[in-house]
Image (cartoon, rainbow, N blue to C red):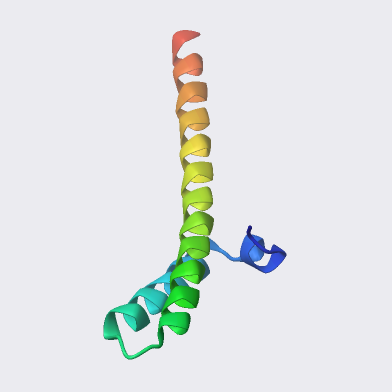
Amino acid sequence: MSSKVDEALSYEQARDELIEVVRRLEAGGSTLEESLALWERGEELAKVCRRWLEGARERLDAALAEEAEEGEGE
């Protein structure tokens, strides 16, 4: 479940932290427990990014639909 802190992250902040998590996982050298914690954090950050992108898509779709409706009225 996402925390309030995660919900307050901007897309860019979540993306940058996710990139760092992936870099650390790919570098290896972590214990199994550390790797699992990083993976779980990465999953949460990916959800934050996905929510931001879905919201952006909805706004874009709404703007395009409004533009299309205005074009029909001419």
Where on the picture, by quarter, is residue 31?
bottom left
Name the spot of residue 54 as percent of width and height, x first.
Answer: 49, 43
Q: Is residue 2 above or below residue 18?
A: above
Residue at image point 47% right, 81% down: 33
Where on the picture, by quarter, is residue 25?
bottom left
For the residue pair 4 and 13, the one nearer the viewer reads as: 4
Residue at image point 45% right, 9% down: 72
Q: Is residue 69 above or below residue 40?
A: above
Residue at image point 47% right, 51% down: 50
Evaluate whether residue 74 shows in this view. Answer: no
Q: Please, which residue is most extreme toward the top here?
A: 73
Evaluate whether residue 1 shows in this view. Answer: yes
For the residue pair 2 and 40, the one nearer the viewer reads as: 40
Task: Locate residue 24 relative to residue 38 in the image: left or right.
Answer: left
Q: Please, which residue is most extreme toward the front here?
A: 32
Q: Please, which residue is most extreme toward the bottom here?
A: 29
Name the spot of residue 23 as percent of width and height, x first.
Answer: 33, 80
Total labels: the figure holds: 0
Residue at image point 36% right, 83% down: 24
Q: Is residue 8 above or below residue 58?
A: below
